[in-house]
Image (cartoon, rainbow, N blue to C red):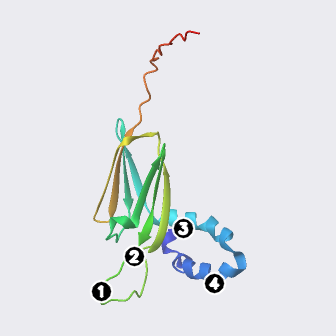
Amino acid sequence: MLNDHPYLKDFANWKDQFHGFFGDDFWKNFDGIFQNHLTQYNLYQGDNELLCVINIPGIDQLDDIDLFVNQNTLEVEGKINLNFKGFKLVQEGIFQGKFKREIELPYQVREDRMEASYKHGLLMIHLHKLIPADGKKNKVKIKKIED
């Protein structure tokens, strides 16, 4: 599995060391690959609802997470920072740092019916399907303007 790969742990260090040689654009191509794998999620579908559950450990302040929905795309970004008073990190197996995740939804969702909650390291987002109008035409009355 990618998480167990020894090079993944040191990716941030490699990025810093080679930044000057390759530049920002080169590394931006890789960020999504590693970050997407590290921010795991499940997407559940009901009749006209979606429930997206994203694994984001160590969030103390909900302001550290930004959540956006645009038609049929869900975006979440933030920063994971796990600190334990009196301890220093010796080995790292849980991703820490800035992340950004885009999730394609199977259909467009309503803007007025979105709920998100965070508990025990899980961000739960409840969305409702946007059901298009029934195709009914709304007649517009036309006024006659006199000369």
The mark closer to the camera, 2 or 3, is 2
Task: Note whether 133 is above or below 69 in the view shown.
Answer: above
Q: Which residue is mark 3?
A: 34
Report which residue position mark 2 lands on.
81
Q: Residues within 10 Å of mark 2 (few under 14, many from 20)?
A: some
In this view, the residue in front, 128 or 64, is: 64
**Three-letter amino acid code at disc 1?**
Lys
First reached walking from the N terminus: tag 4 or tag 3 = 4
Q: Residues within 10 Å of mark 1 (few under 14, many from 20)?
A: few
Q: CA distance from mark 1 to mark 2?
A: 13 Å
Q: Is residue 76 left or right of residue 118?
A: right
Residue 57 to residue 7: above or below: above
User: Is there a contact, CB below 8 Å, between mark 4 and mark 3?
Assistant: no
Instruction: Give the answer, above or below, for where 122 lies relative to 8.
Output: above
Q: Which residue carries the number 4 mark?
A: 17
Which circle, 4 or 3, is nearer the viewer?
Answer: 4
**Could you tell me how far apart the alpha carbons at marks 1 and 3 are, in whole angstroms?**
28 Å
